[in-house]
Image: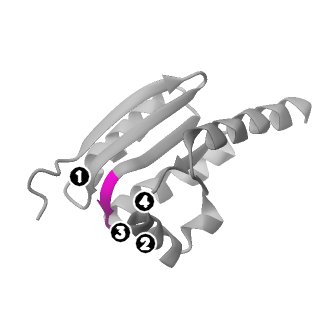
Amino acid sequence: MTEGKKFHIQTILLGDVEGIYLTGFLDAHTAPKLEKVIGDLIKTGKKKILVNFKNLDYISSAGMGVFMEFIESLRESGGDIKMSEMNPKVFSIFDLLGFPILFDIDKEDKTALEKFSLMNRHVETT
């Protein structure tokens, strides 16, 4: 089933936001790879993470758990994880589990990046 749909992670620096672009299937076998990437970014001081799902074909509960693992500590330190470009199939899984209440999920990277900019202004003025 996953033949030809290997999991791949690409990270791209988008100003002061770290972009993570996912491809393929995020499941119990591949979730540790994403966990390591996000954990390493946080260890190096990255607090703003945008995850792009445009090329992600499938996500399991194990894959979703990776985001839950980091979100609280990131927000406590003034950061966040924002998500963009989910296909309808992946979004329906997030929606079923109530993730749109917990995470900003935008149609495009640009909108998510603008929200990070607004977050900066709010932090600077308080």
The amino acid type found where label 4 is placed reads Asn
- Judging by the rendered image, the residue that carries numbered circle 2 is 93
Residue at figure coordinates x 33%, y 40% from the top left: 36
Asked if one can make out residue 63 in the rendered structure from this viewpoint, the answer is: yes
- What quarter of the picture does the C terminus occupy? top right
* Relative side of 65 to 74, left or right: left
Most distant residue in the bottom direction = 96
In the rendered image, residue 121, in percent from the top left (x then y), is placed at 83, 32
Numbered badge on residue 87: 4
* SS type, badge 3: helix
Looking at the image, is mark 1 or mark 2 earlier in the sequence?
1
Magenta segment: does it hold 50?
no
Name which residue lies at 39% across and 30% down: 11
Mark nearest the camera among 1 and 4 is 4
Q: Which mark is residue 61?
A: 3
Q: Which residue is mark 1?
A: 30
- Type of amino acid under label 1: Thr
Mark 1 vs mark 4, CA separation in Å: 19 Å
Q: How many marks?
A: 4
Q: In this view, which residue lies farthest toward the right?
A: 125
- Tell me where residue 39 appears, x and y as whole percent: 41, 39
Q: Tell me the SS state at disc 4.
A: loop
Q: Residue at x 27, y 44 (%)?
A: 33
Q: Position of residue 1 (x, y in %)?
A: 11, 65
Q: Nearer the viewer, residue 107 or 113?
A: 107
Q: Earlier in the sequence, mark 4 or mark 3?
A: 3
Label 1 vs 4, first from the N-terminus: 1
Q: For mark 2, does the 10 Å Cα neighbourhood hold few (<14), some (14 to 19), or many (20 or more) residues?
A: some
> Which mark sits nearer the N-terminus, 3 or 2?
3
Q: Nearer the viewer, mark 4 or mark 2?
A: 4
